[in-house]
C-alpha cells in the first residue's frame, strides 16, 4: 500500500490554516507532478507591509472536481506500478506534487521544490538535504505557456519533462527541448482535423472566433492557410478577450456578423475563459442556426466553472477532445479514495463537500455530517469515479511512460548500484524508444519529436433542458490511419433549429454542366455558376473549367456528359428525303408516259418534226436524270459519291446537247432552203449526231479527269452543324465539280442563245421558242442553285441539288414535250400533213 504524507508547498487553502502544504510520498525513485487542482485564483489585496517578493501573488480559492481526478489518476498510476511485479520489481516509486493553480509563480516555485530541496522557502536548484530525492522526471500540464516556460528554464537539467495537456508545436523542436515529451498530440494535428471535418461536411464558408493570445493568433494563421489550400475561405475572424467584458463596439460587431453572415459553421479556438463573454453575447443575441466547431481547449470534462451561463446556443455542436479510455482498475481505486482512507489528503474534505454536500469530519455551516451512504447529487459528476477524463488518461500514460523507461534503464544495473548510479538525464535515452501496451490495451510510444500520436475524438454536444450537457462520440481523427477522419453522421443530433446538416457556403455548388465564374472578390469561395459553352461539359460539382468533348462526341442536354453525335444525312426515312424520292419516281413515270405517247404516235408529223431520234434520246436522258436524284438520298458510300456528280453531269450534258442539236437542226433546216446555201450538205442526222456526241464527250472527259485527280469521297463533317456529324460526299476537287457544272451551263447558254435567234422562224412545229423557254428555266434554276448550294449546310445541301435536278429536268420535259402531247392528245386535227401544208 502507498502511504500518503503531507508536506508544505506554496499555496494558501481557504478553510485550513495558512500553512504551505505539499503532497508527496517517498520511494526509491520520485516522479514529480505539477497538477492543477485549484483552478481559480485571485490577486492578493495590496498591503504596503508585505515584502516585495510577496506583492502581486495569487491565492487559490476554488477546487475543481475533475481536476482533482487528475491528481487521483497520477497517484493511481504510481500505486498500480508499485503493485505490478513485472514493472520495476523490488523498486518503489514515490511522488512529489505541487499545485500551480494556473500561476506562473507557483509553477516555477513548485518545480524548484521538486528538483532541489525539501524546504520550499529556500528552494535552491541542485541543492538537496534531509531525505534524499531521486527524481527521474516530472509531469506537468498547466498550460502551453507555462509548460514552455518550464521547458526553457529547466531544460538544461535534462530531467525528462512530460506534459499531459500542452499542445504547442514549438515544443516539438528537439534541438531546443531535447528532454521534453508529451502524451497529447501536437497542436498541428488539431488544425488538420478541423480542416478535414469542414471538408467532410462541405462547409467552405467558415467563421472563426479565437482567443486573443499567442495560441489563438497562431491558430487563425494556420487554419486560414490550410483552408485556402483547399479552396475554402474564412468569412470573418474575431479575437475574444480573456474573461474581460466585451467592449460595446466589439460586442455589436460580433452580434451583427453572426446575424448577417452566410457562414453557418463557426470554429471556436479558445478555452472557457475566453468563451465566457461569447456565451453571454449569444444569450442576448441568439444564433440558433449556427454550427459550432469547438477545439479541445474548451473541455467540458474539466467542469463548468460558470454554471449560470446558458449552453443552449451550443446544442448540436461538434467538439474535438483528446482521445481517452479508462483503466480497468480505476473505478475501484477512485471509489476508495475518501477522508478515511486518505486522512492526510488536504484536498479531500473539500472534494467530499462538493460531491456529496456533507462534511466528513464534523457538522459545519451549511454542511451536514456525512453518514457514509451519500450519493453524488450533481449530474455533471455522476461518472467521476467510473471514467477517466482526457487529462486523467494522459497523466496515467505519462507516469507509465516514465516507469517503463526507468524499467529498461534499471535492468542494466545491479540492485545495490541502482540507487546511486541512476540519474534523471539517463532516462531520456530509454524514453525516446519507449513502446508498450497500457492496461487499456492501447499502443503507447513517442515519435521522433517526443509527441504522442494519439487520435482526437469528435464529440456531439447535446444540451438538456436542465442545462446539463451530454457528449456523444460520433467520430475520430487519426493521422496514422489510412482513413484519417471517421464520422458516423447517423449518430449526430443537430440543433433543433435546423435538425439536419447545415450548409455553410458563400455560393452554392455548381452542378455538373456549369463552371465557376469568380466574382470581383478576394474570396475564392464566392462565385457564380455559368453554363458551359457549346461542345464542353463538366461532369463533377464545383469545376472551374469545362472540358471539351472528343470529336465524335457531344454534350447532352444537361452538359454533364459526352454522348455520340447524331449522324445526319438525307435519308428515305426523313420526310424531306421521302418527298424528293416520291417526286423523282413520279416525274420518272410521267416521262415514261410521255415517251409511250410519242412512241405510239412516232409516225405523226408532230413527233417526226425536228429529229425524232433526238427527242427520244432527250426523253431517255430525262428519265435517267429523274432517277439519278435517288443516288443523292441515303447514307453516302464511296460508289454513290462517285456516281452522284458524274452521272448527273454526263446525263444532263447529253440532255442539253440533245436540245442544242435540235436547235441547230432547226436553223440548218430553214437556212438550207435558200438558193446556193452550203448548209444543204448538213441537212440530216449527221450534223445532229455529231453535235450530240462531241458535246457529251467533252463532259465525259472532264468527269474522267476529275475522277482521276481528286474524286468525290464519303466524309463525316463535324464542323458544319453544331453537335451533329453530317454524312456527306466531299466533292474532292472543287475545280472538277464546278468545271462539270460550268460546262453544263455553257451548253445551256449556247442552246438558249441559238434558240432565241430561231424563235421566230415560220413553222407550225418550230420548237425553237419552246427550247428558248426550257433553257431559260434551266439557266434560272442553276444560276439560283449556286448561291443556295454555297449557303446551305448539312443534308439540305443535297436537297437543294436534288431540287435543282428535278426542277430543271421538269422544265425541259414540260417546255419541250408537253406541247407535243397537247397536240397529239387534245388537238389531233393539227397532227396531220394536210394541216401542215395548209399552214
Image: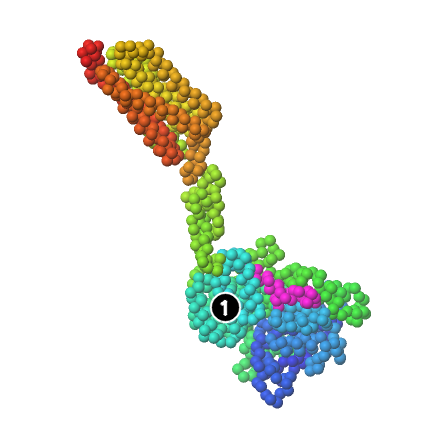
Q: Is residue 580 above or below residue 299?
A: above
Residue 400 visible, this orientation: no
Disc 1 is placed on an element classified as strand
Q: Which residue is mark 1?
A: 238
Residue 779 visible, this orientation: yes
Q: Is residue 763 magenta?
A: no
768 relative to 166 in the view: left or right: left
Q: What is the tally of numbered marks visible in this picture?
A: 1
- Please, which residue is most extreme toward the bottom here? 49
Q: Is residue 184 magenta?
A: yes
Q: Is residue 195 above or below residue 606?
A: below
Q: Quadrant of the N terminus?
A: bottom right
- The percent position of residue 249, horizontal first and vertical second, equals 45, 73
Magenta residues span 166-195
In this picture the colour scheme is rainbow
Which residue is found at the position 70% from the left and 70% from the top?
155
Residue 432 sits in quarter: bottom right
Residue 42 sits in quarter: bottom right
725 relative to 137 in the view: left or right: left
Amino acid at each position: 500500500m502507498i502511504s500518503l504524507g503531507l508536506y508544505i508547498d506554496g499555496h494558501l487553502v481557504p478553510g485550513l490554516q495558512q500553512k504551505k502544504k505539499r503532497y508527496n510520498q517517498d520511494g526509491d525513485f520520485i516522479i514529480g507532478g505539477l497538477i492543477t487542482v485549484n483552478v481559480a485564483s485571485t490577486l492578493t489585496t495590496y498591503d504596503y507591509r508585505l515584502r516585495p517578493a510577496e506583492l502581486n501573488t495569487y491565492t487559490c480559492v476554488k477546487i475543481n472536481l475533475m481536476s482533482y481526478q487528475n491528481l487521483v489518476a497520477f497517484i493511481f498510476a504510481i500505486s498500480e506500478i508499485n503493485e505490478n511485479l513485472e514493472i520495476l520489481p523490488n523498486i518503489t516509486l514515490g511522488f512529489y506534487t505541487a499545485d500551480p493553480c494556473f500561476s506562473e509563480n507557483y509553477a516555477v516555485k513548485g518545480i524548484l521544490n521538486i528538483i532541489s530541496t525539501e524546504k520550499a522557502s529556500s528552494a535552491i536548484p541542485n541543492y538537496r538535504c534531509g531525505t534524499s530525492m531521486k527524481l527521474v522526471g516530472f509531469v506537468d500540464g498547466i498550460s502551453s505557456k507555462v509548460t514552455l516556460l518550464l521547458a526553457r528554464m529547466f531544460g538544461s537539467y535534462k530531467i525528462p519533462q512530460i506534459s499531459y495537456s500542452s499542445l504547442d508545436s514549438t515544443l516539438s523542436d528537439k534541438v531546443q527541448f531535447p528532454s521534453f515529451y508529451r502524451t497529447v498530440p501536437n497542436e498541428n494535428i488539431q488544425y488538420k482535423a478541423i480542416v478535414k471535418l469542414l471538408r467532410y461536411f462541405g462547409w467552405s464558408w467558415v467563421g472563426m472566433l479565437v482567443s486573443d493570445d499567442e495560441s489563438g493568433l497562431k491558430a487563425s494563421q494556420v487554419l486560414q492557410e490550410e483552408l485556402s489550400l483547399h479552396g475554402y475561405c474564412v468569412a470573418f475572424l474575431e479575437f475574444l478577450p480573456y474573461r474581460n467584458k466585451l467592449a460595446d463596439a466589439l460586442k455589436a460587431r460580433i452580434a451583427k456578423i453572426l446575424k448577417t453572415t452566410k457562414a453557418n459553421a463557426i470554429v471556436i479556438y479558445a478555452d472557457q475563459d475566453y468563451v465566457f463573454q461569447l456565451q453571454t453575447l449569444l444569450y442576448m443575441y441568439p444564433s440558433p442556426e449556427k454550427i459550432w466547431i469547438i477545439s479541445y481547449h474548451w473541455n467540458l470534462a474539466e467542469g463548468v466553472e460558470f454554471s449560470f451561463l446558458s449552453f443552449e446556443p451550443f446544442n448540436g455542436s461538434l467538439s474535438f477532445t483528446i482521445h481517452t479510455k479508462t483503466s480497468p482498475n480505476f473505478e475501484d481505486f477512485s471509489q476508495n479514495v475518501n477522508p478515511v482512507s486518505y486522512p492526510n489528503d488536504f484536498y479531500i474534505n473539500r472534494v467530499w463537500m462538493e460531491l456529496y454536500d456533507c462534511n466528513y469530519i464534523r457538522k459545519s455551516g451549511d454542511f451536514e455530517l456525512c453518514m457514509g451512504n451519500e450519493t453524488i447529487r450533481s449530474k455533471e459528476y455522476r461518472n467521476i469515479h467510473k471514467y477517466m477524463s482526457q487529462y486523467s488518461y494522459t497523466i496515467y500514460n505519462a507516469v507509465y511512460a516514465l516507469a517503463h523507461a526507468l524499467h529498461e534503464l534499471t535492468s542494466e544495473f545491479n540492485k545495490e548500484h541502482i540507487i546511486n548510479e541512476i540519474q534523471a538525464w539517463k532516462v531520456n535515452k530509454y524514453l525516446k524508444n519507449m513502446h508498450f501496451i497500457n492496461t487499456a490495451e492501447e499502443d503507447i510510444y513517442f515519435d521522433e519529436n517526443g509527441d504522442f500520436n494519439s487520435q482526437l475524438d469528435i464529440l456531439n454536444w447535446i444540451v438538456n433542458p436542465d442545462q446539463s450537457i451530454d457528449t456523444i462520440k460520433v467520430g475520430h481523427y487519426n493521422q496514422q490511419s489510412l482513413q484519417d477522419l471517421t464520422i458516423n453522421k447517423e449518430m449526430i443530433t443537430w440543433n433543433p433549429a435546423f435538425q439536419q446538416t447545415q450548409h455553410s457556403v458563400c455560393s452554392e455548388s455548381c452542378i455538373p454542366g456549369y463552371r465557376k465564374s469568380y466574382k470581383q472578390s478576394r474570396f475564392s469561395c464566392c462565385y457564380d455558376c455559368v453554363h458551359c459553352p457549346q461542345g464542353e461539359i463538366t461532369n463533377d460539382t464545383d469545376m472551374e473549367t469545362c472540358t471539351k468533348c472528343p470529336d465524335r462526341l457531344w454534350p447532352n442536354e444537361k452538359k454533364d456528359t459526352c454522348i455520340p453525335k447524331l449522324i445526319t444525312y438525307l435519308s428515305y426515312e426523313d420526310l424531306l428525303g421521302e418527298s424528293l424520292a416520291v417526286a423523282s419516281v413520279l416525274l420518272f413515270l410521267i416521262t415514261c408516259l410521255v415517251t409511250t405517247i410519242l412512241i405510239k404516235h412516232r409516225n405523226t408529223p408532230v413527233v417526226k418534226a425536228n429529229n425524232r431520234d433526238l427527242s427520244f434520246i432527250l426523253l431517255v436522258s430525262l428519265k435517267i436524270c429523274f432517277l439519278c436524284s435517288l443516288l443523292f438520298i441515303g447514307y453516302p458510300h464511296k460508289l454513290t459519291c462517285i456516281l452522284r456528280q458524274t452521272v448527273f453531269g454526263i446525263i444532263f450534258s447529253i440532255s442539253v446537247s440533245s436540245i442544242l442539236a435540235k436547235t441547230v437542226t432547226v436553223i440548218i433546216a430553214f437556212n438550207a432552203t435558200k438558193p446556193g446555201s452550203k448548209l444543204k450538205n448538213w441537212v440530216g442526222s449527221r450534223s445532229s449526231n455529231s453535235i450530240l456526241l462531241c458535246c457529251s464527250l467533252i463532259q465525259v472527259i472532264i468527269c474522267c479527269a476529275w475522277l482521276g485527280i481528286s474524286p468525290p469521297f464519303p466524309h463525316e463533317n463535324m464542323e458544319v452543324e453544331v453537335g451533329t456529324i453530317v454524312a456527306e460526299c466531299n466533292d474532292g476537287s472543287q475545280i472538277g465539280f464546278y468545271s462539270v457544272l460550268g460546262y453544263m451551263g455553257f451548253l445551256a447558254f449556247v442552246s438558249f442563245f441559238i434558240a432565241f435567234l430561231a424563235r421566230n422562224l415560220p413553222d407550225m412545229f418550230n420548237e425553237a421558242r419552246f427550247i428558248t423557254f426550257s433553257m431559260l428555266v434551266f439557266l434560272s434554276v442553276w444560276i439560283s442553285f449556286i448561291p443556295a448550294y454555297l449557303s446551305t449546310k448539312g443534308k439540305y445541301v443535297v436537297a437543294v441539288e436534288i431540287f435543282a435536278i428535278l426542277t430543271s429536268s421538269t422544265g425541259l420535259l414540260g417546255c419541250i414535250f408537253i406541247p407535243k402531247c397537247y397536240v397529239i392528245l387534245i388537238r389531233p386535227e393539227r397532227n396531220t400533213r394536210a394541216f401542215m401544208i395548209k399552214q
